[in-house]
Amino acid sequence: MLLVRAVQRPVKEKANPPYTSHRFIFQDAGRLRELAAESIDLVVTSPPYPMIQMWDEHFSRADARVALGLEKGDGDTAFELMHRQLDRVWEELARVMKKGSFVCINIGDATRRIGNRFQLFANHARVLSKFSRLGFDPLPLILWRKQVNAPNKFMGSGMLPAGAYVTLEHEYILIFRKGPRRTFPSAEEKERRRQSALFWEERNVWYSDLWDFKGTRQNTGGEGVRERSAAYPLVLPFRLINMYSLLGDTVLDPFLGTGTTALAALAAGRNSIGFELEASFSRTIRERMQREFSLLAELNRRRVADHLAFIKKCRQEGRSLKYRNEPFGFPVMTGQETGLKLPFLRRLEEEEAGLWKAYYHDDAYLKEVALRCTP
Ligand SMILES: C[S@@+](CC[C@H](N)C(=O)[O-])C[C@H]1O[C@@H](n2cnc3c(N)ncnc32)[C@H](O)[C@@H]1O
């Protein structure tokens, strides 16, 4: 058993949640045999992007007709065959997702010259239509703006009209819901929902349809691994998980890569399950768990510090915050934030290969954090 951080002082295991579990399964997500029907509360994922060169070999390995299509200059057929491989995973999601749960998919379109045709392959549109056919409801989506700094980012005929192309500098976060809105009938669920609230000032930024944080460089075990894995920044799944699930829910990533979704889930106090074809990523994930522990533990502390800075600014502007958050003991803008709690990571344990548990500080710690973060 691997212990990432030793317990500093005796802590009661009464916090909510007392611990979360994180399971990694290294096999094809086209069959999620390990998962029961209607067992997952949220999916956050990013698949290999069809028609992006770095994934040609991946898609061709599973279906030789992809390579043939590309060689013959038949981009449309290659595009469709690549998406059919992703469709198998989307079909499984339709089975394992609970009613009322959300699916968030980060995907970018591709631009490519095949033969003498240069064109856009609209991956986001193809995935959207597949999910509609599966009976999910598409919801307003997020554009993730990723500015490209490369000197050759402008394509086509330069300054001469009419053959220059707009630079693709965004990706999509598609959001779907399976069936009608989730309900919270029991007292336990209502309370868990209250505790899972976001700060008012976070809501105003996170629920905007344009996210422009940079494609953050992160420690994924070297540039080679990052390039091969196409990892997204931790902040992306962390926000989505906080926006679309409750504390103690279970988040699935069928295309886990270097484990970013699992790291975000454990920082957010959610359970997670990840599927990944490449078994070699198990080492990367394990290393990230150890190396990024402090960064993960810091994420919610930073949210508290930002909130306290927000309170200070309100006071300076002569605005008063009417409500008080009970667990932290600080003012908040709305009544919905009065029960908000955040999980503060205390230690991580690898119970067995591919199964981790994350333990959290108890409730008394929240007031300590609020005091420590006061500007
Ligand atoms: C874009 S990457 C995901 C990166 C991830 N979000 C991260 O932050 O590291 C897509 C991943 O899906 C994996 N993959 C592709 N097809 C798969 C399948 N059928 N089942 C499971 N994993 C698959 C690839 O090996 C790759 O690691």
Image (cartoon, rainbow, N blue to C red):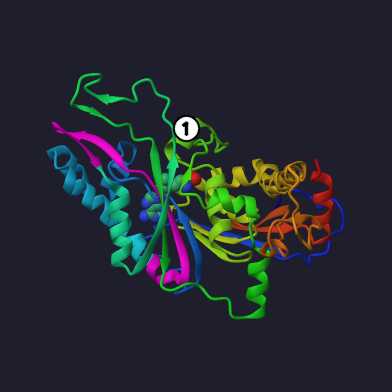
- List the single residue furthest toward the bottom: 186
Q: Quadrant of the N terminus?
A: bottom right
Residue occupying image coordinates x 41% and y 72%: 179
Q: Quadrant of the C terminus?
A: top right
Q: Quadrant of residue 266?
A: bottom right
Q: Which residue is mark 1?
A: 224
Q: Amino acid at mark 1?
A: Gly
Residue occupying image coordinates x 32% and y 50%: 124
Residue occupying image coordinates x 52% and y 53%: 207
Q: Foreground residue, 142 or 73? A: 142
The image position of residue 188, as x and y in percent, is: 67, 76
Which portion, as a residue range, is magenta? 93-120
Q: Is residue 238 visible?
A: no
The image shows residue 113, relative to residue 14, as above or below, that is: above
The image position of residue 248, as x and y in percent, is: 63, 66
| Dominant SS type (magenta) | strand
The image position of residue 354, as x and y in percent, is: 57, 56
Q: Is residue 11 magenta?
A: no
User: Along the horizontal axis of the image, is 135 left or right of 339?
Assistant: left
Q: Foreground residue, 282 or 245? A: 245
Q: Is residue 108 magenta?
A: yes
All told, the count of numbered labels is 1
The image position of residue 92, as x and y in percent, is: 37, 66
Secondary structure found at label 1? helix
Q: Is residue 21 visible?
A: yes
Residue occupying image coordinates x 66% and y 69%: 192
The image shows residue 214, relative to residue 338, as above or below, that is: above
- List the single residue furthest toward the right: 9
**10 Å neighbourhood of mark 1: few (<14), some, or many (≥20)?**
few
